Image (cartoon, grey):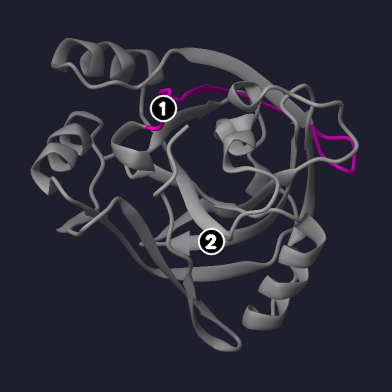
Amino acid sequence: MPAALDHLVLAVPHLEGAVLDLARRTGVQPVSGGSHPGRGTRNALVGLTWQGERRCYLELLAPDPDQPPVAPEETMLGLGALGAEFVPRLHAWAVRTRDLDATLAAAAAAGVDTGRAVRAGRDLPDGTRLAWRLAVPRPLAHGGVQPFLIAWDGPHPTDGSMPTLELVELAVDHPDPQAVERALAVLDVDVEVHHGPHPRLHAVLDSPEGLVELGECCRDRW
């Protein structure tokens, strides 16, 4: 089995406004996900189904005004490098591999930058503790269209009650599609890669309000 889509990251400057906007556009209300202590961010989530995979979700990731200031490079996925105000955009995406350590070793041998595995966690509003390991290159590889890697230690965010939308399209644009395809092959990721003027993630959701396109992203590196 290839690596499985775990989640898409929609970077937004203000979480409450983004939650209201997504609810208006889709008819589905995102649920609070909690904060990332020490990383300067918090999130809200909507479950996704994608090609039969149900353990995946859309993460609305935003600065957390209740946390002390964090250096931009230390924020979750480098969100702080986007500035105080930015246009919401698909910023990154994550996949689960069958064996994180083996995938990291294979990537290193092939010269694919995946970053190193670190541990992270957060508490859900109901008190459930989520813990995971993730590997994120700095800067995000290929302008953000190469996914970062994640492995969950215990519960997955979608194990609880969460509204769900269907992801009907996920594609990647890049000025050098062959380079991206080589990296994705090493990571065992199967997604369409198209030639485009700049790195871009493109996703389309099927919702009670019809098809919804998620915004352009990845022009900004961190």
Label 1: element kind: loop
Instruction: Say above or below: 83 vs 110.
Output: below
Left or right side of 52 for 164: right
**Magenta residues, as a range?**
123-140
Instruction: Say above or below: 153 vs 167.
Output: above
Mark 2, Cα crowd under 10 Å, few <14 / some 14-19 / many 20+, is: many
Q: Can residue 3 be seen in this view?
A: no
**What is the three-letter code of the residue carrying label 1?**
Pro
Q: Which residue is drawn at 64% across and 35% down?
A: 80
User: How far, Cα to Cα, is label 2 from label 1?
Assistant: 27 Å
- Residue 127 located within the stretch drawn in magenta: yes
- Residue 25 located within the stretch drawn in magenta: no
Left or right side of 179 for 141: right
In the image, 145 versus 187, the foreground residue is 145
**On-image quarter of the N terminus:** top left
Q: Which residue is drawn at 35% across and 22% down?
A: 114
**What is the three-letter code of the residue carrying label 2?**
Leu
Q: Name the residue under label 2.
A: 48
Residue 113: x and y, percent? 29, 20
